[in-house]
Amino acid sequence: DIIARAFPGTVVLAVVSVLIAVVISIPLGVLTAVKQNTWIDYISMFIFTIGRALPNYLVALFLILLFARELRWLPTRGWGNVEEAILPIFALTIGSIALLSRYIRSSMIDTLRQDYIMTVRAKGGNTNAIVIRHALRNSLIPFVTVVGPYLASLMTGTVFIESIFGIPGLGGYFADAARTRDMPLLMGSTIFFALILMGTNLLVDIIYR
């Protein structure tokens, strides 16, 4: 009953933040790969490194200070409407964008150096077609490999965000179960998280196609 009640908040928080991060990180990663060793690449990698280094709870506190306290645009706690979901999702999305953009950049750079890409270029292929039709499609395979387990780990790693914003999610219950030695809830949550990881890995294998 506890898992069924708490899981929707956690899955919405994790899935929406990852979806937003994927949509943003793919074009960013492609751009930095195509513009490798230029000022665009250097600035982007600097921002990605900072975004990845900052823990999500620190990002959350900064967002609260800026958008809730100073600008008074968004609420600081609660869960149930769009306004209350913006800050926690944004706090998770920033780190996700930084991580996934670096993966797609690395994968794109490796793909663009392959022999078949050189052959297409030698035949006079259009640059946009080379990047999108040939390089990006193959670069998405290792990218998807990362996204699947990352989504599963994010569902178990939202404890701080849920605590800061007062979200009734599964991460908070899992942490409380460990602290209070609530073995039935702890074992149930562990098995449930393992099933999520197995499910995302299966989904990744299907998406490979």
Image: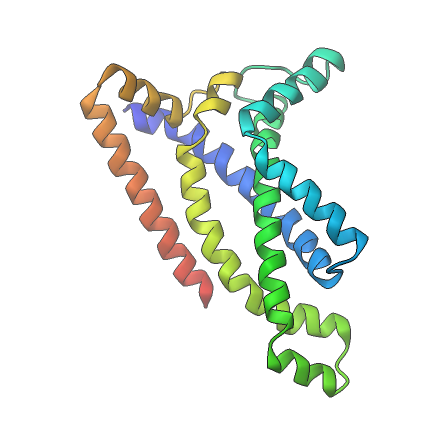
| Quadrant of res 11 | top left
| Quadrant of res 8 | top left
Q: Residue at x 58, y 39 (%)?
A: 52
**Residue 43 pos. (x, y %):** 75, 46
Whether residue 82 is visible here, answered yes or no, is no
**Residue 159 pos. (x, y %):** 43, 25
Relative height, residue 54 to residue 47 (above, below): above
In this picture, residue 201 sits left or right of residue 106: left
User: Is the C terminus in the top left, top right, bottom left or bottom right quadrant?
Assistant: bottom left
In the orientation shown, which residue stands out farthest toward the left?
184
Report the front residue among 20 and 93: 93
**Residue 63 pos. (x, y %):** 66, 22
User: Is the N terminus in the top left, top right, bottom left or bottom right quadrant?
Assistant: top left
Report the label total.
Answer: 0
In this picture, residue 163 sits left or right of residue 100: left
Relative height, residue 190 to residue 42 (above, below): above
In this picture, residue 95 sits left or right of residue 163: right
In this picture, residue 191 sits left or right of residue 165: left
Relative height, residue 8 to residue 65 (above, below): below
Q: Residue at x 19, y 25 (%)?
A: 184
| Quadrant of res 118 | bottom right
Figure colour scheme: rainbow
Q: Residue at x 69, y 52 (%)?
A: 28
Report the front residue among 4 and 42: 42
In the orientation shown, which residue stands out farthest toward the bottom?
123
Q: Residue at x 76, y 60 (%)?
A: 35
**Residue 9 pos. (x, y %):** 45, 28
Whether residue 42 is visible here, answered yes or no, is yes
